[in-house]
Amino acid sequence: EADIYQTPRYLVIGTGKKITLECSQTMGHDKMYWYQQDPGMELHLIHYSYGVNSTEKGDLSSESTVSRIRTEHFPLTLESARPSHTSQYLCASRGWDTNQPQHFGDGTRLSIL
Amino acid sequence: GQNIDQPTEMTATEGAIVQINCTYQTSGFNGLFWYQQHAGEAPTFLSYNVLDGLEEKGRFSSFLSRSKGYSYLLLKELQMKDSASYLCAVRAGTGGFKTIFGAGTRLFVKA
């Protein structure tokens, strides 16, 4: 069973607030990812990391930022939330070998009022 | 460019067999994954193919033809709980790092 945790599970917050979504994994995985997914729609990669001090932007333009100071921790920050940020955010990690699948957290469902 | 195609929706009957197809065009190929995603939940890993042929795992099997850029997921003895989206994902690129997800096929299993 994968050990990857996201908090909070649900967040409803007003426009303009700074938000940090937490993601932690206990598997020692170097590779971590953030995806955005609207209900019934496809996954969009917004950020990824190869390892500590490595972060890259994904395919979907995002106003969020990420950091990777520790292997197990990959937080996502929105400096000023807007209603267009309302979505589900999924964090994932995987091992180094190419045959390793991604393990997903339960997600954070974010609603910006 | 990189592209993965799957049917948007499929409907099948409980107890039947259903085949979900996936075609892909990517730069480099380092394996193909199938994930299951129930509504409102995270994707969970089902299967992995990197060589041509069929991989069987209980009621689920996955097939790959690299020369045709084609895979399918076969679900046997369908159960109501199999109603979910099924995502085809290709690990592409020379470093095998980037995973490209298809939009998913929403499967409805009816009684």
Image (tube, rainbow, N blue to C red):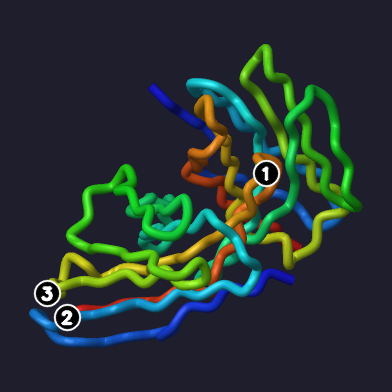
Viewed as shown, does residue B42 lie left or right of B66? Answer: left
Residue A80: mark in rendering: 3
- Going from N to C along the chain, the mark reached first, 2 or 3, is 2
Q: Position of residue B91 (x, y in %)?
A: 57, 36
Picture residue at 64% right of the left edge, 74% below the top = A3
Q: Are marks 1 and 3 in contact (CB under 8 Å)?
A: no
> How far apart are the alpha carbons under marks 2 and 1?
36 Å
Picture residue at 74% right of the left edge, 65% below the top = B80
Residue B94: mark in rendering: none
Picture residue at 78% right of the left edge, 31% below the top = B63
* Residue A45 higher or lower than A24, as above or below: above
Secondary structure under tag 3 reads loop
Q: Nearer the viewer, residue B74 or B89?
A: B89
Viewed as shown, does residue A103 lie left or right of A49? Answer: right
> How far apart are the alpha carbons under marks 2 and 3?
5 Å
Q: Is residue A73 visible?
A: yes
Q: Is residue B107 visible?
A: no
| View extreme (left): residue | A16
* Residue B54 higher or lower than A88, as above or below: above
The answer to whether marks 2 and 1 sit on the same chain is yes
- Give the letter of the chain under mark 1: A
Q: Position of residue A65 (x, y in %)?
A: 24, 63
Mark 1 — residue?
Answer: A97
